Image (cartoon, helix red, strand yellow):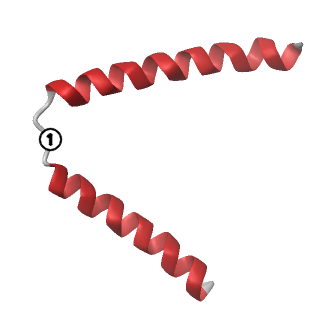
Amino acid sequence: MIRLVIILPLVVIAWFLVVKLMKDVKSAKIDWTGVATIIGFIVLAFWLRHVTGMG
């Protein structure tokens, strides 16, 4: 029961933050090529760490 009391407000707050973020993203002019490049480098770094075991 204590876990539910702690987790439920965190889930509600996270949901509101996600909704607010989506509204901000839709209204903003974003360079999606740059965002995709950054995400690609992060994914590549994790993949190389997994493959080589270094890092």
Q: Is residue 20 above or below residue 52?
A: above
Q: Mark 1 — residue?
A: 30
- Classify residue 39 as left or right of residue 50: left
- Three-letter amino acid code at disc 1? Ile
Q: Residue at x 39, y 20 (%)?
A: 19
- Classify residue 37 as left or right of residue 11: left
- Can residue 55 be seen here? The reply is no
Residue 10 versus residue 26: which sits nearer the camera?
Answer: 26
User: Which quadrant would the N terminus be assigned to in this image?
Assistant: top right
Residue 42 picture location, percent across and down:
40, 65
Residue 21 quadrant: top left
Q: Number of labelled discs?
A: 1
Q: Residue at x 20, y 27 (%)?
A: 26
Residue 32 picture location, percent across and down:
18, 50
Q: Is residue 44 above or below residue 24?
A: below
Residue 24 quadrant: top left
- Can residue 6 be seen here? The reply is yes
Label 1 environment density (alpha carbons within 10 Å; few <14, some 14–19, many ≥20): few
- Classify residue 51 as left or right of residue 40: right
List the single residue furthest toward the bottom. Answer: 52
User: Which quadrant would the C terminus be assigned to in this image?
Assistant: bottom right
Residue 45 picture location, percent across and down:
45, 73
Q: Is residue 34 above or below residue 46?
A: above
Q: Residue at x 46, y 16 (%)?
A: 16
Helix, strand, or loop for circle 1? loop
List the single residue furthest toward the right. Answer: 1
Q: Is residue 3 above or below residue 33?
A: above
Q: Residue at x 24, y 30 (%)?
A: 25
